[in-house]
Image: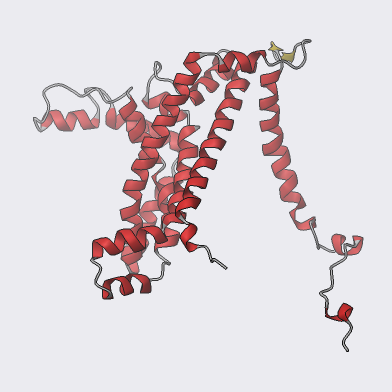
Amino acid sequence: MVDATLMAPRRRRFSLASFLDGGGFWPAVPAVLYLAVFMVAPIVTLLAFGFVTIDRGTVGEGGFTLAHMAGVLSDPLVWRLMWRSFWIAVVSTTLTLVFAYPVAYAYGHLKGIARTLLLVAIISPLLTSALVRTYAWIVVLGGRRGLLNQTLLSLGIVDQPLQLLNTSTAVVIGMTQIHLPFMILPLLAVLSERDRRFEEASLNLGASEVSTFFRVVVPMSMPAIVAGFALVFAVSYTNFIIPQLLGGGNYSTLAVQVYEQTIVVLDWSRGAALATLLLSTCFLFVFAIVALGNCFTRWNEVRR
């Protein structure tokens, strides 16, 4: 008989020599240290400021307190700003999905130079700062001298210049265009590599092209839709540059309020409390998006 101990898989034993030679956790240590020092530590420090009293850049003698967080949670203005941030993020993210899906679907059917040019057109906006693109939208959506109003007035379509800048519409337009590549790229990865045999089988069984698209292609791309929706929602919900510039001085969101309290008013404790609320709610919303997306993608799980 064969000894059972010989048939059992051998467990790798940790040794200091293998660790120093590059095995185990050692290759990841530089990356972990970098993230801990330059990302985790600043965020923890910022969030900690919301639970202490800071006066003129120094921590007060009161120690730990929940007064700043309680003041933020009891302020009706904060909840209105959070609702505005949520609403703008949902609308802009939905619009990016509507505009991104046809582009990603067309990319999967193109070949050669046309496919390369489309990919360059998708990636090229990421080579320009979001701040520069936001200022470009100010030029387009400006007052009477704005590019859009000048075009509409010269064509006789409108008699008076439209009020587009410093409105929610301008913020949604800016966020949709600036965040569009973040929705297109996940869809490209899935739609361009999908198995076309499922579509051919659907068509051979008598389904129309429209039915095949909505009942075969869209379900196959659902993981990319969930990933893109969560990513774009997160960057839209926490963005302050676009609402600050396209919304105007009187237009504020929760992220803009964090910036104003921290940089302008210099109330670091309230700004940190607002930042805690912003990050925690963003995490909850993204978690809800992913959880809801998992409910729509359970069909691709292997059942045993």
Quadrant that contains the N terminus: bottom right
Q: Horizontally, is 222 left or right of 264 in the view?
A: left
Q: Is residue 227 above or below residue 277?
A: below
Q: Residue furthest left?
A: 156
**Quadrant housing residue 218:** bottom left
Name the residue located 57 percent from the left edge and 16 percent from the top edge.
72
Say whether residue 162 is visible. yes
Query: In front: 106, or 213?
Result: 213
Q: Nearer the viewer, residue 145 or 163?
A: 163
Could you tell me which residue is drawn at 38 percent across and 31 percent down? 135
The single residue placed furthest to the bottom in the displayed view is 1
- Left/right placement of residue 41 relative to residue 196 reads right
Q: Nearer the viewer, residue 150 or 241?
A: 241
What is the count of numbered marks? 0
Percent position (x, y) of residue 293?
47, 49
Q: Name the residue located 43 percent from the left edge and 67 percent from the top edge.
A: 193
- x, y (%) of residue 208? 23, 66
Q: Quadrant of the C terminus?
A: bottom right
The image shows residue 210 at horizontal and vertical percentages of 25, 61
Picture coordinates of residue 86, whole percent (x, y): 44, 30
